[in-house]
Image (tube, rainbow, N blue to C red):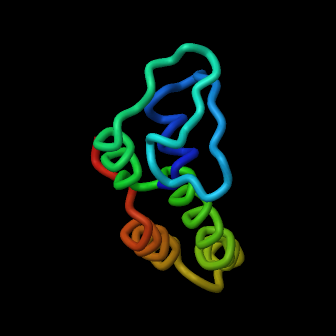
Amino acid sequence: MDITAALRHLRPGAQWSIPAGCVTADCVIWHDGAKPVTQAELDAAMALPDLALIAVQRATAYAAEADPLFFAAQRGEATMEQWRAKVDEIRKRYPKPAS
């Protein structure tokens, strides 16, 4: 997760800005009185997987790999089992983190 996504995750709705090149908690400028994040909080949040990126990666793979198999199965040119196997493969390649 990048710094902007991490800040949105840590302080939803807060107003802040980041000077060019800022990658640490101490250079974030808070505009609405929100409690500033600590470097430890920021580091922990940045280590989390980026759910938006995972969603894009999955959607792209489904469209390029699984959807053609689904439509081929509809035409009788592939099986639904092949399609399900491809969907499972994509899910394993781009796993969502456990809750």
Question: Relative to 60, is 53 on the left or the right?
Answer: left
Viewer-proximal residue among 63 and 5: 5
Viewer-proximal residue among 27 and 44: 27
Image spot of residue 52 (x, y percent): 56, 51
Q: Is residue 61 above or below residue 15?
A: below
The residue sitting at 59% across, 72% down in the picture is 61
The residue sitting at 63% across, 43% down in the picture is 18
The residue sitting at 61% across, 15% down in the picture is 32
Question: Relative to 16, is 36 on the left or the right?
Answer: left
Image spot of residue 80 (x, y percent): 51, 71
Q: Is residue 32 above or below residue 40?
A: above
Q: Is residue 95 above or below residue 32?
A: below
Viewer-proximal residue among 79 and 90: 90
The residue sitting at 51% across, 37% down in the picture is 7
Q: Is residue 42 above or below residue 23?
A: above
Quarter that holds the C terminus: top left
Question: Relative to 98, is 85 on the left or the right?
Answer: right
Image spot of residue 76 (x, y percent): 65, 80
Q: Quadrant of residue 62?
A: bottom right
